[in-house]
Image (cartoon, rainbow, N blue to C red):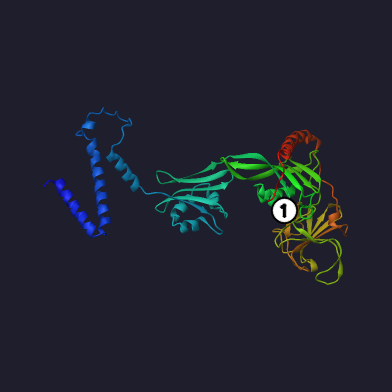
């Protein structure tokens, strides 16, 4: 009997047996697949030999020249088999969790700790490699538990890239990512809150905080903001590698509060500081803030009141700002710490001495700012502590006092002088840059009706 017939008969018998035994179908398929792969591998050299008429008549290929012929079916099948047998690399993007370290991440993913130690030993990358924050993303590429690549962004403009080379050694380098800053106009109408209006325009909470910071000396956003107020801003948007990264700084702004219009432009001083000025060059910054706590409400004003703890009429020599526990409290002006500790009904209290015999008091705090001590000098806006309800307090709030020569004054009635205006030496440069910014602000103001929060 010819061999081909014998193989056919054997296959038929195997098929009949498989039909009687379903479990044998899988085994039969595996055998047939292996046989086909074997035939393909054997046929490859046979087709390239001189006994094959199609190749023996072909022109010889010069040494080093690439073959441009199309591979036959057997060669294609062999290439597919080779690709199927090649191990696949695993790519995992790990979002760093609280208390995560690279050691814990490698152990969690069952990656080689020896590889991590080798990467750590590379010069100049230890700090960029190990300093992780919650929310960071680390990309790990591995093969059979061995690290082949690691990548993580170390800053807005730099990415650490580690790769295993052909010789098995690791190499690391820092890839520079260029940033592009674009400006975009935003216009909004207040119907409920500043945050909601800004968010509905597609901007972040940080933009709302910035806007409040720009006009914090003229508008008390906790007490004076009302429906119908509007704003227009020219905002920087930061892009990286063609993708939006984050909101930047406000470069020009207009706010209409209770029918009164305030305008501001940003200007960078020679020492690198960026300040906001009116269009005619007057600084928006003043000696004292209107309120040391942002987005709070006045729960008790200055003057006589019924004391909620003592249950009797008593002079209230400050203003109470109700806010959640932990809300930051900022220094109202430049000053020096003269007291930090616990004092009677004030509870945790800090006292600052300012020029001109002025003193400010911050009471009922839950805790003090880290590193705060008597004698330390604070700049306006620096952290003093956090809102609490220590001492004689029925709820969380800041008790704020303003004293001149030891005499209590109503903080809400104090009108302070602005900071220094643009100097004559910088006036020409300021006017040129301010005109450009104001032109963008005017264009944004007239482009469309303001968008209100929905």
Report which quarter residue 383 is drawn in: bottom right
- Residue beneath the point at 78% across and 46% down: 256
> Looking at the image, which is closer to me, 120 or 413?
413
Q: Is residue 370 left or right of residue 13?
A: right
Q: Whole-percent x and y of residue 107?
A: 46, 58
Task: Identify the residue under disc 1.
Answer: 193
As drawn, which residue projects farthest toward the bottom? 311
**How many tags in the picture?**
1
Q: Is residue 227 above or below residue 325?
A: above
Q: Is residue 37 above or below residue 61?
A: below
Res 443 visible? yes
Element at label 1 = loop
- Residue beneath the point at 85% across and 62% down: 317
Q: Whole-percent x and y of residue 49?
A: 22, 35
- Residue beneath the point at 25% across and 39% down: 44
- Residue beneath the point at 54% across and 53% down: 130
């Amino acid at each position: 009997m010819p061999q081909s017939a014998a193989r056919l008969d054997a296959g038929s018998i195997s098929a009949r047996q498989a039909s009687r035994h379903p479990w044998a179908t899988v085994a039969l398929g595996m055998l047939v697949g292996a046989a086909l792969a074997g035939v393909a591998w054997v046929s490859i050299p046979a087709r390239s030999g001189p006994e094959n008429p199609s190749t023996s008549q072909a022109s010889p290929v010069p040494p080093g020249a690439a073959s441009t012929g199309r591979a036959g079916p057997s060669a294609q099948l062999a290439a597919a088999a080779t690709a199927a047998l090649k191990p696949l690399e695993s790519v995992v993007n790990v979002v760093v969790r609280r208390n995560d370290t690279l050691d814990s991440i490698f152990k969690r993913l069952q990656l080689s700790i020896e590889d991590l130690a080798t990467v750590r030993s590379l010069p100049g990358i230890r700090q960029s490699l190990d300093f992780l924050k919650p929310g960071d993303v680390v990309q790990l590429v591995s093969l059979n538990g061995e690290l082949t690549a690691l990548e993580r962004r170390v800053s807005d403009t730099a990415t650490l890239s580690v790769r295993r080379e052909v010789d098995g050694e690791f190499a690391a380098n820092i890839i520079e990512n260029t940033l592009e800053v674009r400006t975009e106009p935003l216009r909004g109408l207040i119907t409920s809150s500043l945050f909601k209006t800004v968010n509905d325009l597609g901007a972040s909470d940080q933009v709302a905080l910035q806007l409040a910071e720009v006009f914090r000396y003229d508008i008390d956003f906790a007490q004076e903001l009302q429906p119908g107020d509007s704003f227009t801003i020219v905002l920087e948007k930061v892009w990286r590698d063609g993708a939006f990264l984050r909101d930047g700084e406000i470069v020009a702004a207009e706010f209409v509060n209770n029918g009164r219009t305030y305008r501001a432009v940003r200007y960078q001083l020679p020492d690198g500081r960026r300040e906001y000025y009116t269009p005619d060059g007057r600084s928006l910054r003043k000696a004292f803030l209107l309120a040391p706590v942002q987005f709070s409400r006045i729960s008790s004003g200055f003057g006589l009141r019924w004391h909620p703890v003592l249950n009797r009429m008593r002079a209230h020599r400050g203003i109470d700002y109700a806010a959640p526990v932990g809300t930051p409290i900022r220094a109202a002006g430049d000053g020096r710490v003269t007291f930090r500790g616990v004092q009677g009904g004030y509870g945790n209290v800090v006292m600052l001495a300012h020029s001109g015999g002025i003193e400010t008091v911050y009471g009922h705090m839950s805790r003090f700012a880290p590193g705060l001590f008597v004698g330390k000098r604070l700049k306006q806006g620096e952290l003093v502590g956090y809102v609490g309800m220590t001492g004689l307090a029925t709820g969380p709030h800041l008790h704020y006092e303003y004293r001149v020569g030891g005499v209590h004054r109503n903080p809400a009635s104090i009108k302070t002088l602005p900071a220094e205006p643009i100097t004559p030496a910088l006036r020409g440069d300021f006017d040129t840059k301010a005109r450009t910014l104001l032109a963008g602000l005017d264009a944004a103001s007239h482009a469309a009706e303001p968008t209100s929060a929905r």
